[in-house]
Image (cartoon, rainbow, N blue to C red):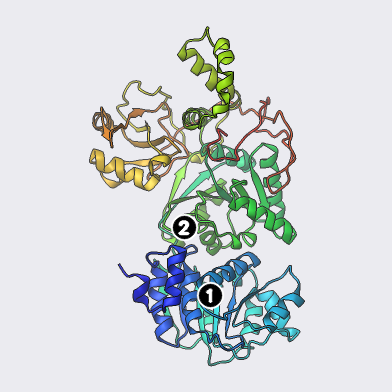
Amino acid sequence: MTKFEALGLQKSLLDAVTDLGFETPSEVQEKAIPILLEQETDLVALAQTGTGKTAAFGFPLIQKIQSDSRTTQGLILSPTRELCLQITNELKLYAKYEKNINVVAIYGGASITDQAKQVKRGAQIVVATPGRMKDMIGRRLVDISKIDYCILDEADEMLNMGFFEDIKDILSNTPKEKSTWLFSATMPKEVSVIAKKFMHNPKEITVGDKNSGATTVQHEYYVVGGRDRYPALKRLADTNPDIFSVIFCRTKRDTQKVAEKLIEDGYNAGALHGDLSQNQRDLVMNSFRKKQIQMLVATDVAARGIDVDDITHVINYQLPDEIETYTHRSGRTGRAGKSGISMVIVTRSELRKIKSIENKIKQKFLQKTIPTGIEICEIQLYHLANKIKETEINEEVESYLPAINDVFKDLDREELIKKIISVEFTRFFNYYNKTRDLNSADAGSSGERHRERGGDVPTSGSVRYFINVGEKDGYDWMSLKDFIRDTVGLDKDDVFKVDVKESFSFFNTDAEATEKILATFTEFKVDGRFVNVEVSKNPGGGGGRGGRDRKRSGGGKDRSRSSSRSRDRNSSGKGRDRKSSEGGATYSGKRRSKRKSDFF
């Protein structure tokens, strides 16, 4: 496989590559870097977010810059302040062994005078948002009339945000003989106009299919009633105890409202939108990167600066108006080769939009049903058991053990385990037991009855299984699906609805494969450890992933819950717990989710 050494990079940049831990170039880097180093040419590069585009243009730009000149030679335009700062910081890391190369970020929300002073001191590379750059050009605080290279990063998103006229005005202040490099996830009409107007016979490279979504992302949709959007969101979160997600809303008002509701219900959530001050946005993003916030509710514009590789889920609380925007949303997960899930909550009237998105991104959506309360309880029960098992022992309890043992002396092992589990699980069970089905009538239901794990083997329909391996064993939904398929000897589509948790997982097959699966995983070991598979009591699954969907039902009436303790929280994850409901009685207890290992 091609290494960075073969791309033509000079030694100082290769040393930086080594320090950064890069080993093998991504596809867009492998295609773009040689072209940009060997030729003075315009370039259009179509690649999804998270594929390494910054390095694809950053390394060639730094290598071509004349460091002994203080003239601004390279201009990079990016849609948001966060992305502008991110690119600036990355370029500084790339140029750490280069002498006298200065990279300056220009963006709104900071002192324009200070930024002008930094440029005046000598900035060979300027990274800017279109609005602030146009303002500085108008005030004659920056001179881009002699640049050699102009890079438009996330071009489609800049144009989608309304920067078309600003970009045209900025480019009109640059020399005609420069090289223009345009990087974009999609190629809408406006991007084509920019390319035709300001670029000359550009070379084009495409990573994956043009306008397609990333192959590491699985797309799912859930059909609910309009009033059930928020309860559905909570159930999807509770089905994934280790969730680390971005939730997209269409408006700033909805973004703030959903974030506040989640915080009131005890989730570690935060809001990111344009009405926040720059300091508030910085605080929210810092908390999110540290995983103090696990559910970040954001508008599309504000989310452009999010560059976190291990986001597990993107949840579309509302679908965007533009299909290209969905592509950007789903690109927040499944980055750097990792797998991810993009969930969409829709009403019946919005189902036609799913088909349009499928055609655009060239990927199929899996229709899922919102998990029932019993299914969520089962997942949370296993999660709690594994949390207890994996908890590190605090040796400070040693001195208290005699007294504690005296308290437990009349309990046998089984009764003690039941009581420990019930301390937290009872609250959860009381909330979700007998809750109603949130799925729209079109989402599908069946008359299959719940069966206890290890019960009678089903003879027809879809069968749900429990397996005692999960994320801590190195599996995600793709690799676990492959493991089961290869171990049992099944076809690719025979294993579906794979749902991987921290220490255990679920998956489905048709009933015809059940006997073969149970026989294969009898006394089955991997690296000396028994891998057990049992029939789950939830044949329909729900919230799973990895293949075809099956229908099933819930039932009953929802109950609400409220937190028993208050603590200071605001939209960045610090506020007070208050009552919120799906309807009915309440249950008490604080949701603790600051650490991934926590039960809730």
Picture quarter with the N terminus: bottom left
In this rendering, position of residue 463 left or right of residue 346? left
In this rendering, position of residue 320 left or right of residue 217? right
Identify the residue at horizontal 42%, vertical 64% (top origin). Answer: 22
Q: Which circle marks residue 76 in the picture?
A: none
Secondary structure of the residue carrying tag 2 is loop
Residue indicated by mark 2 = 335
Picture quarter with the C terminus: top right
Residue indicated by mark 1 = 189
Nearest to the observer: residue 313 or residue 409: 409
Q: Residues within 10 Å of mark 2 (few under 14, many from 20)?
A: many
> Residue type at mark 2?
Arg
Please identify the residue farthest to the top as the structure is shown: 410
Rendering coords of residue 94 (x, y %): 50, 72
Badge 1 vs badge 2, beta-carbon distance below 8 Å:
no
Which quarter of the figure has residue 129? bottom right
